[in-house]
Image (tube, helix red, strand yellow):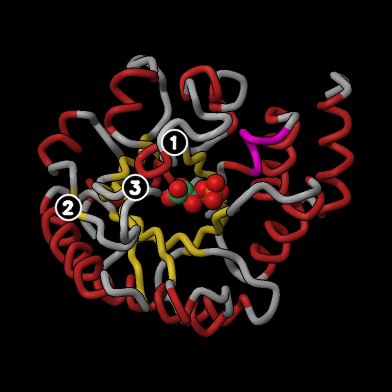
């Protein structure tokens, strides 16, 4: 692996081998998502606890202070919307020249397996990897499974994670599943991070799945709504960071959450 690629990956994956990415890219297909109406304000209390921010160029340019010392993972796929016909029919909407101009440490794009857009998104991934590898820029695949594959089961998650790695993704983002999550990680030859999905009922549920996912081999998270849509984003962020980087158990994370919430930590 060349110096540039190694250097960029080391900005994302910390010396302990773990990573906490904070995604605020949801507006790219959802518009002004609840909690992200003003992304710059949303991240103010929490960004310093993230290892990297994941976002689009529009939010980066307009809402983020360019003097911020935090690596950026630029989402470069999109051109679909929640009111459109097919969320899987994404295109690459940001050039590699722009990625370099914005000094991103990595790029991310969605990969949809089991949908009509499967071939298009996998072809997009291959092309993006080809272009980015020329400049030492890692690609993170944000994996999804559709239609009959919609069930978040290990065999489907493992399928899309493995295919993304085979095509050249350097990091894979997957959803967590309770049963056999280790199959997803073990079958994927590149580091795996877990997304949070829609906000859960309790904060403890998030601590539980992040902890379990990491016990089963994930290197960390790319987790948004279960941080910035919660009532206590700072407490949530710090508790999740403690699980990722300090091997806190869910119970220890919950205690820290309560302390931060009460202003005692
Ligand atoms: C989807 O909108 C994005 O790719 C997110 O970055 C990803 O799903 C992780 O965010 P969350 O934890 O909110 O699911």
Position above or below: 263 against 183: above
Q: Which residue is mark 1?
A: 53
The answer to whether the beta carbon of the residue marked 2 is less than 8 Å from any atom of ligand 1 is no
Residue 179 drawn at (x, y percent) = 69, 79
Q: Helix, strand, or loop for circle 2?
A: helix
Residue found at x 42% / y 81%: 159
Residue 73 drawn at (x, y percent) = 35, 41
Q: Earlier in the sequence, mark 1 or mark 2?
A: 1
The answer to whether the beta carbon of the residue marked 3 is less than 8 Å from any atom of ligand 1 is no
Q: Earlier in the sequence, mark 3 or mark 1?
A: 1
Position above or below: 68 against 116: above
Residue found at x 68% / y 57%: 210
Q: Is residue 161 left or right of residue 220?
A: left
Q: Helix, strand, or loop for circle 3?
A: loop
Residue found at x 54% / y 24%: 43
Indicate whether residue 107 is drawn in magenta.
Answer: no
Q: What is the quadrant of residue 235 in the picture?
A: top right
Q: Which residue is mark 3?
A: 81
Q: Is residue 236 left or right of residue 264?
A: left
- For the residues labelled 2 and 3, the Cα–Cα distance comes to 26 Å
Badge 3 crowding class, 10 Å Cα cut-off, few under 14, some 14 to 19, many 20 or more, is some
Position above or below: 40 against 209: above
- 21 or 30: which is nearer to us? 30
Q: Is residue 247 visible?
A: no
**Magenta-drawn segment:** 226-230
Single out the mark in the foreground, 3 or 1: 3
């Amino acid at each position: 692996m060349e110096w540039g690629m190694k250097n960029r990956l080391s900005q994302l994956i910390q010396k302990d081998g773990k990573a906490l990415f904070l995604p605020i890219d949801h507006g790219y297909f959802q518009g002004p998502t609840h909690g992200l109406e003003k992304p710059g304000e949303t991240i103010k209390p929490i960004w310093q606890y993230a290892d990297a921010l994941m976002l689009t160029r529009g939010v980066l340019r307009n809402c983020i202070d360019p003097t911020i010392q935090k690596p950026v993972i630029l989402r470069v796929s999109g051109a679909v919307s929640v009111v459109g016909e097919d969320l899987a029919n994404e295109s690459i909407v940001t050039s590699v020249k722009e990625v370099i101009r914005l000094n991103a440490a990595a790029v991310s794009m969605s990969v949809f397996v089991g949908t009509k857009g499967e071939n298009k998104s996998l072809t997009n991934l291959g092309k993006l990897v080809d272009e980015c590898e020329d400049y030492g820029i890692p690609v993170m695949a944000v994996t999804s499974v559709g239609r009959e594959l919609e069930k978040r089961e290990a065999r489907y998650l493992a399928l899309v994670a493995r295919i993304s790695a085979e095509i050249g993704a350097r990091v894979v983002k997957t959803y967590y599943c309770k049963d056999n999550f280790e199959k997803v990680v073990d079958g994927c030859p590149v580091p795996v991070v877990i997304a949070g999905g829609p906000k859960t009922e309790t904060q403890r549920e998030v601590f539980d799945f992040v902890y379990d996912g990491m016990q089963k081999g994930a290197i960390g998270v790319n987790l948004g709504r279960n941080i910035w849509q919660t009532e206590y984003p700072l407490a949530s962020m710090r508790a999740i960071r403690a699980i990722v980087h300090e091997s806190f158990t869910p119970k220890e994370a919950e205690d820290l959450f309560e302390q931060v919430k009460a202003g005692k930590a």
